[in-house]
Amino acid sequence: MPASPSSSAQAARQRLADQLREMRRAARITGVEFAHRAGWQGSSQVSMIERGRRTITADHVRLWCRVCAAPPAREAELLAEQANVASMWVSLREHQDLGLNARQQATIGDLYSRITSELSYQTKVIPALLQTEEYMTEVLRGVRRDRRLELDDVAEAVATRMARQQNLHRPGVRFVFLLEETVLRYLYCSPGVHRAQLGHLMEAMRLPAVSVAIIPMDADRVGARARESFDIDAFADGGVKAYVELLSGLLTLTHPDDVAIYRRAWDELFALAVVGDAARALIRAAVNAAG
């Protein structure tokens, strides 16, 4: 079962804190002695960092490695893990003064031009890469209202997102979209726009790089409950990341254990889905339900 985004971020920070504590203990240095060597007044700061109660910076990692005489290779490993922990959570409050377009440039950027494959699970809306311009406009207007953004740059944000859809035709890339059937039913726009979106979804299913699977509303959910929407992206260098976008920010998971949790959830959910003609039948039923 996937951990909550907040607990995933905390678990990653705790893993790093545990490694710093074990490194100090392996060097046979007490907390009091460590604080003395670090030039701190007391050992409380040592305890706070090693218990995961404080943000661990790159300077903290370098300090622990210097005091404990860690080899350069170990320092490099810990610095890489610290960088991953630091980049896990991007709070949208940090971009409160920006509009939608600048926000998505800061959180997504050129991601889709760098991946080799994506597994995307969606419980709320049609994935952005498969949206029509009209449907996307209504979705982003809703996002702007939810986040109470003063700047109205919906049109610019739509143009940026529509340009990303060219990646669906990029050679060597693969996209698998897994949707809950309820996604086909939610009316975020007029029935006409919604029906056109569902028709576009069926057209997109013909693209060589695209696969669409749908979990029926009457599927047996024992052992595979609906989860938060998430994406799992693979890169040419062999790296894999999981992304979870929430109302308040974007969680990026890079640790293999964290990514594996979401991959297991994907496999469990995908086993419930239908594809091909059965998936198209669910889409046509949603078209009819939209009037």
Image (tube, rainbow, N blue to C red):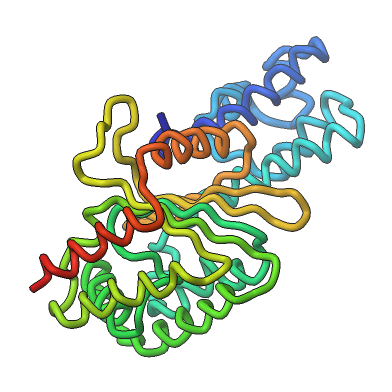
Q: Give the residue at x 46% y 79%.
A: 161
For residue 263, side relative to residue 230 (left or right) = right
- Residue positioned 87% across, 27% down in the render: 70
Placement of the N terminus among the 4 image quadrants: top left
Outermost residue, front side: 277
Q: Position of residue 232 (x, y in %)?
A: 54, 50
Camera-side residue: 232 or 172?
A: 172
Q: Position of residue 243 (x, y in %)?
A: 50, 52
- In this rendering, the answer to whether 269 lies above or below 189 is above
Q: Is residue 4 left or right of residue 231?
A: left
User: Could you tell me how many numbered marks the image carries?
Assistant: 0
In the rendered image, which quarter contains the C terminus? bottom left
Extreme residue in the left direction = 291
In front: 93, or 277? Answer: 277
Q: Quadrant of residue 196?
A: bottom left
In the drawing, does residue 10 fall left or right of residue 71?
left
Q: Is residue 50 shown left or right of residue 238?
A: left
Image vertical order of residue 121 relative to residue 71, above or below: below
* Residue 265, position as x, y percentages in the image: 44, 35
Q: Residue at x 68, y 16 (%)?
A: 31
Q: Residue at x 72, y 12 (%)?
A: 30
Residue in front for this viewpoint, 67 or 177: 177
Q: Position of residue 80 (x, y in %)?
A: 74, 44
